[in-house]
Image (cartoon, rainbow, N blue to C red):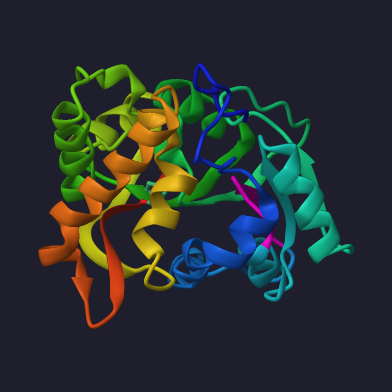
Amino acid sequence: MDNKKTSDSQTIFQNKWDAELYDSKHSFVSQLGTDLVELLAPQSGESILDLGCGTGYLTNKIVDSGAKVVGIDNASTMIEQARKNYPNLIFEVADATNLHFTEQFDAIFSNAVLHWIKEPEKVIVSIWQALKPGGRFVAEFGGKGNVKAIVTAIYQAIQAAGYPINESKNPWYYPSIAEYGTLLEQAGLELTFAMLFECLTPLEDEKGMENWLKMFADSFLNTFPIEQQMTIVSDIEKQLYPTLYKNGIWFADYKRLRVIAIKN
Ligand code: BEZ
């Protein structure tokens, strides 16, 4: 994904699908998903799709169970890195809203990805098609209220810098249990478990919030002049410092939605 450039072709924001940056600074996203692999409870011999596999960390954890796993991601940079990290595993570039597999899977797993796709109905139809009857869908992603403090601070800082709020620049879809459960059930996937929970998540270091904003929140800010981008980031940090900075570490106010659904 390319960043839009400012009028003088500068941006402080980076490509969020820069696989090396992701592995070095934001690997916590995958590491947090280890619990979700336990919930998936993969069995030896099962066929499993890892939807939004990133650089392959959790795909490899699932493979440890003896399951046959295919990892997919729509970012070719992530798939290239995943293939380098785990040369013996299967990874493909694919679009979650439009999956085309000839064989169906026993389970579909997805961690920290679905909040990036603003067409949940299409993803759910794809998941239904790719699952065997009785197959399970196990996912975790940002739920209603995810990074609320950060988004509020972003909007306030943009306004303080003299720009209007443009909601369409918000890249995320954060549904409630009721909203997502309804979509699943409408598509023929029976919701058997759902949990929306707060998950205050430590970021890497003193620059954690700045790096997080650069990696994930670029779409809000990358059209502004470079000096304004820096002013806005400092303002966001100033606002969040009292609540999300503790003992030298920044935290993100994640709120995760975890679901299990079974294909009828
Ligand atoms: C999340 O995992 O909830 C998340 C990650 C990046 C940006 C926004 C949310």
Q: Is residue 59 above or below residue 41?
A: above
Q: In the picture, residue 229 is in which quadrant?
A: top left
Residue 50: in magenta span: yes
Say if residue 171 shows up in the picture.
Answer: no
- Is 127 rendered above or below residue 49? above
In the image, farthest residue toward the bottom? 247
* Residue farthest toward the left in the current orientation of the protein: 242
Image quarter where the N terminus lies is top right
Q: Nearer the viewer, residue 214 or 178?
A: 214
Which one is in front, 254 or 133? Answer: 254
| Residue 185 spot, x, y in % from top left | 32, 31
Q: Which image quarter holds the C terminus?
A: top left
Which of 235/212 is in front? 235
Question: Who's the residue at 19% across and 33% down the image?
Answer: 155
Q: Is residue 11 visible?
A: yes
- Image position, residue 156 (x, y; %): 14, 35
| Residue positioned 12% across, 64% down in the render | 243
Q: Residue at x 62, y 43 (%)?
A: 17
Q: Is residue 79 left or right of residue 120?
A: right
Q: Residue at x 76, y 56 (%)?
A: 82
On the image, the x and y values in percent for residue 84 come to 85, 60
In front: 158, or 90?
158
**Residue 255: % across, % down:** 24, 55
Q: Residue furthest right?
A: 88
**Region in magenta:** 46-56
252 falls in the magenta region: no
Task: Please tell me how many numbered marks the rendered image carries.
Answer: 0
